[in-house]
Image (cartoon, rainbow, N blue to C red):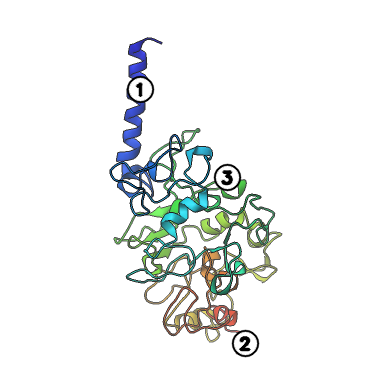
Amino acid sequence: MDKTCVFKALTAIVVIALIVVTAPALMAYHSGTSLRCSQCHTQHFSQTHNYTTAPITPTTDKAPLGTTPRIYLLKDTVNAICKSCHDDAGSKDVVGAFSPTTPFVREAGALNELGGTGDYAEWKGHTLGSVATAPGGIWSDSAGLKCTDCHEPHGDPAGALDLSGVPIPVPYRNLNTEAGGASRGSINVSLANGATNDTSKDVWIKASGFSTNNIAYNEPSTTRSAMAEWCQKCHTNVHGDVGGTTIGGSGSPATQFTRHPSAGVDVGAVGDLTHSSLIRLNSLTNKVKLMGYTGTGAAPSTVTPTCITCHKAHGNKNPFGLIYMSGTGTVTEEGDSGTSVKDLCKQCHVQGT
């Protein structure tokens, strides 16, 4: 290769790099000015100072070097790097207790860690470092659960094409489309972002940030849930089609389920007007998140529960990350004034006392 060819090749590489770094519109998160490559990666594992100041500090170079070089030129283990930004007192904290300057209720709740006890013990949600098999499935990470088992740190470029020439949508919260070792469809994000809700999308982001008040879940299809299908790849046997081998159910509307459905069944679909579960739901001030409910006013007759209706995606202080929502009191990551799983069930069910 002559010098001209070498120059052209290097120029092309530089241009591509500049496009990736300077075009935040192409990426979901971790792009543009929100994150620098050098905050997670190091070319030679010899860095002793920042690009502008010395020494390295957590505020300007979030992940200082670990003890040994790692694959993908990572500065440290995946979880250590992620925690350098997402386990602190700021609004991006998703591990354990939460105390930002202006507190809010995190939509996904909080992860716990291997060996955790007390409020964030191992059994209360997704556990970083755990090698346990996912409940209801067969998948596990033999090296310990990592943030990147569920999230793609770089995101997928909006407008980019996959190898088949199909456009790659921006995934919600950088969710990894191949998490659990199997390919899965992306969860589309409504770009309404404070404007009119696009109900053809699975998620309505009312405003930026991780607050539960900023997110609502749509139901583009009456028979499926993109979020449930995403969760299914690890928690295989607790998801599926109504009437199928995993969920069961018969009749129209379906009853006699063998596992709780996460799509295809509306609240209040069974029962007369006097005993309607939907009437019960709409009598409550605080409601769990349901597909097809925007979070204000009365829930329509088509609202449907899914995985994140009952569970915090990361976890919380309750077993299995359950949301004990009684319907009254101050809303927290654990629910409100509810104290048990019975309070959660009675959001949508009128049986019992």
Query: Gap in Å between the C-alphas at discs 3 and 1?
Result: 34 Å
Sequence-first tag of 3 and 1: 1
Which of the marked residues, 3 or 2, is nearer the chain's N terminus?
3
Q: Nearest the camera: 151 or 283?
A: 151
- Foreground mark, 2 or 1? 1
Q: In the image, what residue type sits under mark 1? A: Leu
Q: Which residue is farthest top?
A: 2
- Mark in the foreground, 3 or 2: 3
As drawn, the label of residue 161 is: none
Residue at image mark 3: 183
> CA gap, disc 3 to disc 2?
41 Å
The quarter of the image holding the N terminus is top left
Tag 1's secondary structure?
helix
In this rendering, the answer to whether 89 lies above or below 184 is below
Q: Is mark 2 on a helix, strand or loop?
A: loop
Question: Residue at horizontal 36%, vertical 65%?
Answer: 214
Seen in the picture, residue 184 relative to 12 is either above or below; the reply is below
Quadrant for residue 88, please give it. Answer: bottom left
Residue topped by disc 1? 10
Quarter placement of the C terminus: bottom right
Q: Where is residue 335 in the image (x, y as percent from the top left)?
A: 49, 77
Where does the image place residue 215, in percent across and percent down from the top left? Answer: 40, 64
Q: Identify the residue under disc 2.
A: 352
